[in-house]
Amino acid sequence: MLGKLAFVPIEVLFVTLVIHRLLNSREKAAKLEKLNMVIGAFFSEVGTKILVYFSDFDPKIDKIREDLIMRSEWSDSEFAAVSGRLRNHDYEVTIGKVDLEDLRSFLLSRMDFLVRLLENLEHESFTDLLRAVFHLTEELSSREDLSWLPDSDYAHLAGDIKRAYVLLVSEWLDYMKHLKNNYPYLFSLASANG
C-alpha cells in the first residue's frame, strides 16, 4: 500500500501538467482566432482598399498580378511559393500618380477604427503593419498642401507607402491562407471581391 502511495504525487503532477498544457493550447487557439477576426475586420474596412489603391500605382504589378488572384485549389505549398515570389517583388508606387489628398482623407476617416484595432493586438507582424499605416497617415496629415511638395517629401512619402504596401501584401496573403484553411466560404467571398 505504501508503495502505491509513493506514485500518487507523480501521477497528480503528470495529470496537472497535461491539463495545464491543454488549457494553454485552448487559450492560444482562442487568442489566435480573435486575432484573425481583428485582421479580417482590418482588411474588410481598410486593408483591401489601400492594397488595391497601392497596387493600382505599382508600375511592376504585372509581375505579380496573377499571384494576387486567389485560387480555391491552392495548397499550402502553392501559398508558400506565392509568398516567396511576393516577398521578392520590388514593390514600388509611382508617387506622382497617387492622389495624396484622397489617400489622406480615406486614412483619416478610418483613424478611430484603426486605433480600436491597435488596442486588441498582441501580434508582431500585424502590429508592424498598423504602425506603418499610422505613420503614413501622420505623415500625410502633417502636410497642409499635398498638391505641391518638395521632392524630398515625395521621396519620404513614397518610402512610407512602400513600407505599408509590402506589409499589407504579406499579411493579406497570410490571412487569405487562414481563411482558405479554416473558413472556405469566407475565402470564396474574399477572393471573389479581391
Image: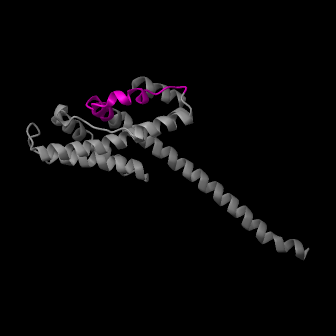
Q: Is residue 193 above or below residue 96?
A: above
**Residue sitting nearer the eye, 130 or 11:** 130
**Residue 123 image position (x, y, % from top left):** 43, 51
Residue 175 seen anywhere in this rendered image of the structure: no
How would you classify the magenta stretch by its main secondary structure? helix
Q: Residue at x 40, y 40 (%)?
A: 88
**Residue 138 image position (x, y, % from top left):** 20, 48
Region rendered in magenta? 49-73
Q: Is residue 114 above or below residue 176?
A: below
Q: Quadrant of residue 92?
A: top left
Farthest residue in the bottom direction?
2
**Residue 34 image position (x, y, % from top left):** 48, 45
Farthest residue in the top direction?
192
| Relative side of 27 to 116, left or right | right
**Residue 74 image position (x, y, % from top left):** 54, 29
Q: Quadrant of the N terminus?
A: bottom right
Residue 58 seen anywhere in this rendered image of the structure: yes
Q: Residue at x 18, y 31 (%)?
A: 97
Q: Is residue 132 above or below residue 44?
A: below
Question: Magenta stretch containing residue 61, yes or no?
Answer: yes
Farthest residue in the right direction?
1
Q: Quadrant of the C terminus?
A: top left
**Residue sitting nearer the eye, 132 or 94:** 94
